[in-house]
Amino acid sequence: MRFVTIVGARPQFIKAAPLSAELRKRHEEYLVHTGQHYDDNMSDVFFRELNIPSPDRHLGVGSGSHAAQTAAMLERIERVLLDVKPDAAIIYGDTNSTLAGALAAAKLHVPVAHVEAGLRSFDRRMPEEINRVVADHLSTWLFAPSQVSVRQLAAEGVTEGVHEVGDIMADGVRLFAPLARERSEALARLGLNPGEYFAATVHRAANTDDAERLTGILQGLSAASRPVVLPLHPRTRAAIERHGLTSLTENTSGSLRIIEPLGYLDMLQLQQNAAAVLTDSGGIQKEAYYLGVPCITLRDETEWIETVEAGWNRLVGAEDRKILLAIDESPAVGGRPHPVLYGDGHAAERIAGHFGNT
Ligand code: UD1
């Protein structure tokens, strides 16, 4: 079969790496990068480290409002699909690149395969929730990471083409965490000792657009008992400046240490040696779990509810007091929890297997 794979944002490069490798054993893949993320440390570094083939087409869409960004992608993806005439389009996760890929393909009657289908936060104010719902309802193949996601699809009447395959990000951790241990020099470079710091990420619109929430998070992270290392997403950097909060990030007497965004191997190494991870990212909640590191989630809800039920993730929101309390109570670093949620790290083989050998 001939596939067009559409990626554009950082987590999609990580998800596409294992499946691209599997697909290319038997099929033809044409890789399209929308250009949603474009800085070297948000994009190119992942292609280099994860051995992802260079994109066949780079659409250079860049930043913009949701409508402007999605519209530019739609127009350019449609042209690629008309040129390449694939048998199927593959989309990942819940970004604007996912939405544009699903819409452009479905309208041209190109069947869509959605990897990471069926996730819901049940909060339609999140752009990601809108992207997920639309992508799922337009897809022919829905590769779901868990039983909960299969049930959520069924509750919306989507039962055909749904396959529970496990989480493809577990493939990434299985393949790359050992390499990170071997190759990453992040801890030495940052002067950190294993188990003596916290790793943090913040980039969700709900946290960055709301000055009160962003203030609460930055104050909480600045008052922790150990260093908190925060590789700063460009969206968050811009929001800190916009809300006039730079005094909170430039205060060197607090525990907060802001650094540039990291590549995947350095990020895995930072996480796997942290006392706990604080994040509003979906992917990092799971990565922390796979790496056996407790997670404190800076949101009021999560799509990955199983990690909370298993006791490895706590939802604390954005208030400094609650963040600090959770840090104080975070359990010591343990082994990888059992039973393992979201499959065994072989989702890519299962997904590729659905497409046979032709
Ligand atoms: C997107 C996804 C989110 C995903 C996240 C991972 C949507 C709606 N959201 O959010 O689901 O978890 O990616 O990071 O698609 N920017 C740069 N350099 C870059 C990339 C972005 O400076 O390389 C800046 C741009 O100015 C942009 C802002 O960051 O305005 C936000 O980027 P955007 O593409 O809107 O998405 P993310 O916030 O990264």
Image: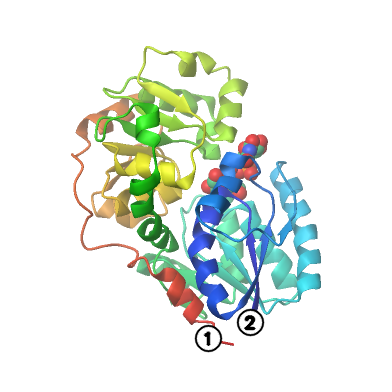
Q: Amino acid at mark 1?
A: Gly
Name the residue rendered at 52%, 81% in the picture: 160
> From the Cβ of disc 2, is ligand 1 less than 8 Å away?
no
Quadrant position of residue 272: top left
Q: Quadrant of residue 278?
A: top left
Q: Secondary structure at mark 2?
A: loop
Amino acid carrying label 2: it is: Met
> Compared with residue 176, is residue 62 higher up or lower down, i.e. above or below?
above
Tell me if residue 250 comes above or below residue 88 in the rendering: above
Seen in the picture, residue 155 relative to 8 is either above or below; the reply is: below
Closer to the camera, 354 or 27? 27
Q: Earlier in the sequence, mark 1 or mark 2?
A: 2
Pointers 1 and 2 in contact (C-beta within 8 Å): yes
The mark tally for this picture is 2
Residue 356's disc number? 1
Residue 301 in sight from this viewpoint: no
- Find ligand 1 in the image and state its quadrant: top right
**Relative to the observer, which residue lies in front, 222 or 213?**
222
Looking at the image, residue 212 lies above or below residue 102: above
Query: To which residue does mark 2 refer?
Result: 1
Give how far apart the Cα atoms at labels 1 and 2 are: 9 Å
**Residue 144: percent from left, percent from top:** 45, 69
Q: Residue at x 44, y 51 (%)?
A: 283
Q: Which mark is residue 248?
A: none
Q: Quadrant of residue 332?
A: top left
On the rendered image, what quadrant is the N terminus found in? bottom right
Query: What x and y, as percent, mark residue 12?
Result: 55, 55
| Residue at x-position 40% and y-position 30% | 189
The crowd level at tag 2 (other Cα within 10 Å; few <14, some 14-19, many 20+) is some
